[in-house]
Amino acid sequence: MSYLGKIGTVPIFLFLLCTAAWAQPVVNVYSSMAEKDVRQLVAAFERRHGVKVNLWRSGKNRVLQRVISEARAGKFDVDVVHNPSPEMEALHQEKLLRRMNSPRLAELIPQAVPAHQEWAGPRVYIFVQAYNTKVVATAELPKSYRDLLEPRWKGRVAIEGKEQEWFYTLVQAMGEAEGLQFFRELAANGLQVRMGNALLTNLVVAGDVPFALTLYSYLPEQQRRAGAPIGWLALAPTIAATDAVGVAAHAPHPREAALFYDFMLGEGQQLMAQMGHIISDRRTAAQLARYQLKFIDPAAVIRDYDRWTKIFEDTIHGRP
């Protein structure tokens, strides 16, 4: 019996269903966004466009390393990368992203669109300080970074262990010599180091960490809205950055990749706003202006990345 003859023994609706499944377009996305939030975005995109998203989610460094290592091995599986802007700038330097000319770019704040247009930032990260409201009294909250050097903060402050971009930008804003001295004194005052923004947020909520020095503002804000005992403030200078989405230079599904890219800068951006994220739409400029933000310069960070990573680790982690 021929292959076509065998089909006749299968109910036609099952055959059509299987054929449609085989034909469904896909897009492969690597992202470091918080799991629960990126899953919502993926589900919304799939409903809107009928494209199956194969999502791989990990930390920002692992996302960067995977894209580079796969490319060097001649393996080009990824279509879209979603990661903080310094890590995406590193992919630009490696020539692993393609220039996009989406009309959505004109709708974003200038800091979200580099001149090369190989990535664009749908969100703004404002680095804030969070505290447990049951453990830290409002009256004792610091008014400046230097207040954290007081003896009453000894052992009560924690930093996320991979924030060298924030560290670099704040040190430069303070003046390099003064900034490095501040962090040496802060480390000597019993600074805790924790890995992962979500973990650090949860530790503040639990009261295990009274005060967190570096958190993306949306994380404590989401917890606060849910009724958790957490508050946050933004010490000056307040450091900010954008995340970034980009299409891989050798994307195996370029049409679907472009669809996902535009979704992240359009409908997806509005969904992120509903989740409590600060988006980079130009209409948010007035909201951002009240913080007098100092934005991380991804290109400057990447130019001296290894040196500043070592300085950060030597200072914060206490490595010799």
Image (cartoon, rainbow, N blue to C red):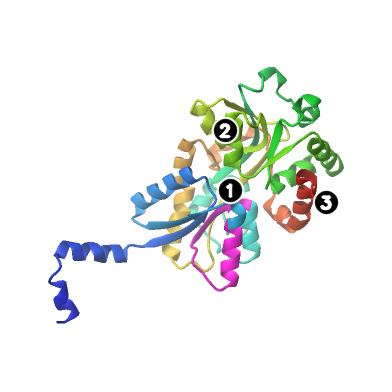
* Visible residue check, residue 119: yes
Q: Compared to 79, does 47 lie above or below?
A: above
The secondary structure type at the circle numbered 2 is: helix
Disc 1 marks a residue whose amino acid type is Asp
**Closer to us: mark 2 or mark 1?**
2
In this rendering, would 141 be left or right of 99? right
Q: Residue at x 68, y 52 (%)?
A: 298
In this rendering, would 206 be left or right of 320? left
Are discs 3 and 2 less than 8 Å apart at CB? no
Q: Give the x, y percent position of residue 110.
A: 61, 47
Residue at numbered disc 2: 220
Q: Residue at x 56, y 49 (%)?
A: 121
Q: Which segment did they paint magenta?
A: 63-85
The span from disc 3 to disc 2 (Cα, nearest Å) is 33 Å
Query: Of 32 and 134, which appears nearest the observer?
Result: 134
The secondary structure type at the circle numbered 3 is: loop
- The numbered dot on residue 159 is none
Q: Compared to 66, does 310 lie above or below?
A: above
- The numbered dot on residue 320 is 3
Numbered disc total:
3
Using a 10 Å C-alpha cutoff, classify the residue at mark 1 as few (fewer than 14 neighbours), some (14 to 19) or many (20 or more). many
